[in-house]
Image: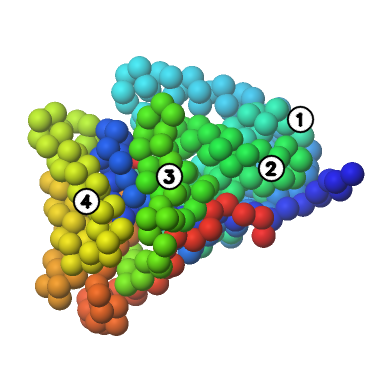
Amino acid sequence: MKKSNVSVKVSSPGKVHLIGEHSVVYGEPAIIAAIGKRCYVEAEKDDAVTITSQNFGKSLSFVFDEVKAFNGKITELWNEAYKNQNFSNLFSITRNDPINYAKVAVCIALEKMKMRGGVSLNINSEIPFGAGLGSGAALAVATIKALSELYDKNLSTEKINNIAFEVEKFAHGTPSGGDNSASCYGGLIWFEKGNPNKIKSLKKEVPYELNNFVLIETKKSGRTTGELVQLVRSLKEDYRNKRIKAIGKLTYEMLEVLKNKGFIKMKEIINEAQKNLAELGVSIPEIDEICSSVRKIDGAAKLCGAGGGGVVLCYHKNKAKLMETLKDLGYRPIEAELGVEGVRIE
Ligand code: MEV
């Protein structure tokens, strides 16, 4: 008989969109890589629910009975928000602080898994929060997997991904599901929102390592992913759709380029994607300046995730030269491996 776990440690990676953020919300595809920065979650059986994290600088503890009431409240707020297409009331509870996101993740997971007991969670994340790297999605995926292991639920990766998507909805309103899928499955994926979503590993098409990319962090966005998605939605339809379609077309081109290692063309595609994202209003002057400096040395750069600040993905065939340029601009480049393993037990 399998011995029941008293405590478990699980981790799940952050992600970076090589291309396709925002357009993916409108049904266009995205190419997303899991990155070598992970969120670690340690879980222990407990009567109450306790969340601690050195990242959040605070902890949270509540009685198990609160789970149902909390989920009822956020579900009601989501339904109302969806009807009015205004998620501000929901975000004021779920988004202001990463510990609130952790609360949503654990409460939804406990209810979806029909748990009768609580859990004590300790979260330690290497992924900067609110920076476009899917920190929340990774936290949700790791939390759900940890609970599944702890209480011997043996949830499949697909099921974990579905619950993580529910959590993401409470944090972002109407997300595509790409972030949680990249974190869950890992590697490099082709993602298309739909019924059901299309999630395809690109391991066969891209069997080599994606080197020559670095990430840098700009000022954090003051706006949530949901707010930035809403901002794009509020643009004039013709104007918006032209850019969304353009990014969609670039994504198909990117797949061909990745297959054929056409790195010169890839550079153009990344820069063109950034141009379209900027026209959608989700770039900021600091990111525009970085992208322009990288283009000047014959490289490519684009914002990541919802934008409004956060991380910039930079590419150059000469990585050392790229690093030097970014350092000269006053940034500390983050060298993160792309295409790493998805959620796993540590
Ligand atoms: C956020 O990381 C990516 C967006 O496309 C939103 C989403 O896909 O849910 C902006």
Name the residue that disc number 4 marks.
253
Depth check: give the residue in front, 53 or 336: 336
Q: CA distance from mark 3 to mark 4?
A: 17 Å
Q: CA distance from mark 1 to mark 4?
A: 49 Å
Q: Left or right: 225 with respect to 51? A: left
The amino acid sitting under disc 4 is Glu
Q: Report crowding for label 3: few under 14, some 14 to 19, many 20 or more residues within 10 A (C-alpha).
A: some
Q: Position of residue 5 (x, y in %)?
A: 80, 49
**Label 2's element?**
helix
Q: CA distance from mark 2 to mark 1?
A: 12 Å
Q: Quadrant of residue 328?
A: bottom left
Report if the CB atoms under discs 2 and 1 are less than 8 Å apart. Answer: no
* Mark 2 / mark 1, whichever is N-terminal: 1
Name the residue that disc number 2 marks.
147
The amino acid sitting under disc 3 is Lys
Report if the CB atoms under discs 1 and 4 are less than 8 Å apart. Answer: no
Quadrant that contains the N terminus: top right
Q: Report crowding for label 4: few under 14, some 14 to 19, many 20 or more residues within 10 A (C-alpha).
A: some
The amino acid sitting under disc 1 is Arg
Taking the spot 73% from the left edge, 31% from the top edge, the residue there is 115
Residue 296, compared with residue 260, is above or below; it is: below
Give the mark toward the camera: 2 or 4. Answer: 4
Of the numbered discs in the image, which one, if any, rests on residue 116? Answer: 1
Q: Left or right: 49 with respect to 270? A: right
